Image (spheres, rainbow, N blue to C red):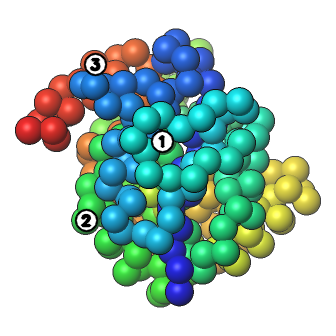
Amino acid sequence: GRTAALIPAAGSGTRLGRGPKAFVEVAGKSLLARSVATLAPLVDEVLVALPEGLALPEGVPARAIPGGETRQESVWRLLHATPADVVLVHDAARPFLPEGVVQALLEAVPETGAATAALPVADTLVRGERGRWADLVPRAGLWAVQTPQGFRRELLLRAHAAARAEGFSATDDAGLIARLGFPVTLVPGDARLFKVTTPGDLALAQAVAAVWDA
Ligand code: C5P
C-alpha cells in the first residue's frame, strides 16, 4: 500500500517569536526542510499543512495544503488530502528526525495500526501546586511521547471523526486512538527529536545542527 508523511506546519510560532515556526532556519535550513529531507526518500508522498496564504520554502519536495485553526484541524485536513493506506504524522517543529525511527514506525504500524515514537522519562516527576512540591509521580513506566506517529489512515480518520463529534481535543494523534481503547505501539524515539518551542530550544537546535550537518 501507499505511504504518506503528513506534516502539520500551520502553527504561528507564538512562543518562539520568529514568525511561522516551520520557516525558521537553523544553520541555513528551515525546520520544515530538515524533517522533510529524512521523510521524502522513505514515503510515497509528503504533504504539509501551511498557514493560510503561505507557500512552501524553497527546496522542500512536498505538496502543500492550507492548515486549520488547531493542530488537530490541520491533521484532519491532511488526512483527507491523501489516498495513502499508511500515514506518518510528524510535527514540523521537530527538525532532527533519524531515519531509523521512521523505519521502526513503518515496521510497527501493521501490528496494531497505530504506533508512536516515545522515550522513557529520565527526570524525577512531581505534581506542583502554587509553586510548591505537592506529590511525587513515580516515573516507572512513564514515556514522553514524540512524533512521528504512524497509523493506518482509516483508523486515524475514525479516531479524528469521533473526537470531532465529541468536541475532544488532543495535542497529538496517538492520544485520539488510545482514547477509543485501541492499542498504540511505543517505538523508541530519540533525544534529538525534541520539539523546538521556545527561544532556548532554538539555541539547542543550533548546537544539534552543527553535529547533524557535519
Ligand atoms: O504549537 P505546537 O508546537 O504544539 O505545534 C505542533 C505542530 O502543529 C507544529 O508543527 C505546528 O506548526 C502545527 N500546527 C498546525 N496547525 C495549527 C497549530 C499548530 O499545523 N493550527
For badge 3, the amino acid type reads Ala
Is the C terminus in the top left, top right, bottom left or bottom right quadrant? top left
57 over 159 or under it: above or below: above
Query: Within 10 Å of the Cα at label 1, are there few (<14), some (14-19), or many (20+) other Cα atoms?
Result: many
Q: Residue beneath label 2, please?
A: 100
Q: Label 1: which residue?
A: 92
Residue visible at 66% across and 67% down? 82
Callout 1 secondary element = loop
- Earlier residue among tags 1 and 2: 1
Determine the CA span between mark 1 and mark 2.
18 Å
Look at label 1 and name its amino acid: Ala
Residue found 14% across the figure and 30% down from its top: 210
* Mark 2 residue crowding within 10 angstroms, few (<14) / some (14–19) / many (20+): few
Residue located beneath label 3 in the image: 203
Above or below for 207 versus 47: above
Mark nearer the N terminus (3 vs 2): 2
Give me the C-alpha separation between circle 1 and circle 3: 17 Å
Above or below, comparing residue 145 to residue 184 in the picture: above
Q: Secondary structure at mark 3?
A: helix
* x 28%, y 25%: residue: 28
The mark lying in front, picked from 1 and 3, is 1
Q: Tell me: 36 left or right of 79.
A: left
Residue 39 in the image: state x and y as whole percent.
38, 59
- On the rendering, which quadrant does ligand 1 occupy? top right
Q: Is mark 2 within 8 Å of ligand 1?
A: no
Nearer to us in this view, 211 or 2:
2
